[in-house]
Amino acid sequence: MDVIKMTRELGKAIQSDERYENFQQTKKNNEADSGLNALMGKLNLAQMSYQNESESENPDNAKMDAYDKEFHEIYGELMQNPNMLRYEASRIEIDKLMNHIMQLLALCVNGADPDTCEPEAANCGSGCAACGGCG
């Protein structure tokens, strides 16, 4: 079996994983949530208003501060939406899965034993602040 074919098989396995299925469902729930979509529209409008004002010939700092405040208020409300909270939790889980897979692959590319290597055992030496996580 060649590497590309095996990668496609890995893709199928990822898509059958419950974390992937949960992530897909939470995305659908967000798309169907009209209140959440209205908040996203307001958030985008506040962001565009801020950007337009900041790029104008004579930006009005008071307007920019008001747009910034509005953006943060809407963002706070958006992040309290139950569908968004579930989406964020599922996104974190799928990101952890993908980080773990990528770290395993990186270890293997660097010569580690594919049957026994574990990202947690890897000593990257750069500290955790710059890391995507150990999976």
Image (cartoon, rainbow, N blue to C red):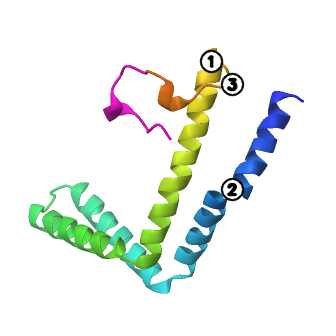
Alpha carbon of mark 2 to alpha carbon of mark 1: how far?
Answer: 25 Å
**What residue do we see at 44% from left, 39% from top?**
133
Residue 30 against residue 132 in the figure, above or below: below
Q: Mark 2 points at which residue?
A: 17
Q: How many residues crowd around disc 3 within 10 Å: few (fewer than 14), some, or many (20 or more)?
A: few
Q: Three-letter amino acid code at disc 3?
A: Pro
The answer to whether mark 3 and mark 1 are in CB contact below 8 A is yes
- Is residue 125 inside the magenta stretch? yes
Alpha carbon of mark 3 to alpha carbon of mark 1: how far?
Answer: 6 Å
Query: Magenta residues?
Result: 124-135
In terms of image quadrants, where is residue 20?
bottom right
Q: Mark 1 points at which residue?
A: 112
Name which of mark 2 and mark 1 comes first in the sequence. 2
Residue 78 against residue 4 in the figure, above or below: below
Residue that sits furthest to the front in the current view: 116
Please state the horizontal and vertical placement of residue 114, each as a whole percent of the image. Answer: 68, 24
Q: Mark 3 points at which residue?
A: 114
